[in-house]
Image: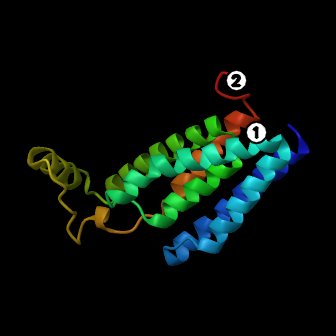
Amino acid sequence: MSMELLVMTVLLLGLLGVAVVSDLRRHRIPNMLVLLGLALGLGGQMYLGGVSGLGDSLLGILICFALFLPMYALGGMAAGDVKLMAMVGSFLPFHFALWAALFSLIAGGVCGFLIVLYRGQLLQTLGRYWLILKAQAYLAPTSDEVASKPFPYSIAILIGTLISVYWQLVAGGFGD
């Protein structure tokens, strides 16, 4: 692993750490943090790979943004989460950005499931989803359901990114 790649990884994880703390404290991810991350990710990828690295970074941004935007449109996450995932994409080669986004979505689902399970609302939540399927329309959770409370999705993005970075740096990638 090159020193430059290590620096990029540490920067990315540091920015994600700041985002998690902000998300936990204020349920917000600062735009300036995301803009700084985008600039560092784009600049770092361009430094590492020239124009090809810049293209990789832009494609990573696009992939992550495109995968998370529908979740925002459906009300499943906040705009800051979409922007944060796009920032992650700027730091990673596009195929690892794709894996980071997919692992982040899986981590978010697992975290949500564990929260519902911990709060003892599994049957209530499954019942609401069953009604959604039957009605073929979204039914918002009631105010007493844990699903109606904000979830700091930056935690899932951090977990998904950590898994992708682990595979990229330590395990040698996904068949690369």
Task: Measuring from the top left, give residue 155's x and y in whole percent.
Answer: 54, 58
Task: Measuring from the top left, give residue 51's x and y in whole percent.
Answer: 78, 43
Task: Measuring from the top left, give residue 94's x and y in whole percent.
Answer: 64, 39
Residue 92 shows up from this direction: no
Task: Measuring from the top left, give residue 111's x and y in whole percent.
Answer: 44, 52
Label 2 is placed on what type of residue?
Asp
Bin the neighbour count of mark 2 within 10 Å (Cα to Cα): few under 14, some 14-19, many 20 and up.
few
Mark earlier in primary sequence (2, 1): 1
Q: How is the image coloured?
A: rainbow
Label 1 is placed on what type of residue?
Ser
Tag nearer the camera, 2 or 1: 1
Horizontally, residue 135 falls left or right of residue 11, namely left
Q: Residue at x 59, y 72 (%)?
A: 31
Q: Tag on residue 150?
A: none
Residue 150 shows up from this direction: yes
Going by the picture, which residue comes out furthest to the left?
A: 135
Going by the picture, which residue comes out furthest to the right?
A: 3
Q: Residue at x 32, y 55 (%)?
A: 116
Going by the picture, which residue comes out furthest to the front?
A: 51
Q: Is residue 98 above or below residue 176?
A: below
Secondary element under disc 1, as helix, strand or loop, is helix
Q: Is residue 114 above or below residue 23?
A: above
Q: Is residue 144 above or below residue 111?
A: below
Secondary element under disc 2, as helix, strand or loop, is loop
Q: CA distance from mark 2 to mark 1?
A: 17 Å
Q: Residue at x 21, y 48 (%)?
A: 126
Q: Quick one: quadrant of the N terminus?
A: top right
Residue to which mark 1 is pinned: 52
Residue to which mark 2 is pinned: 176
Horizontally, residue 72 falls left or right of residue 98, namely left
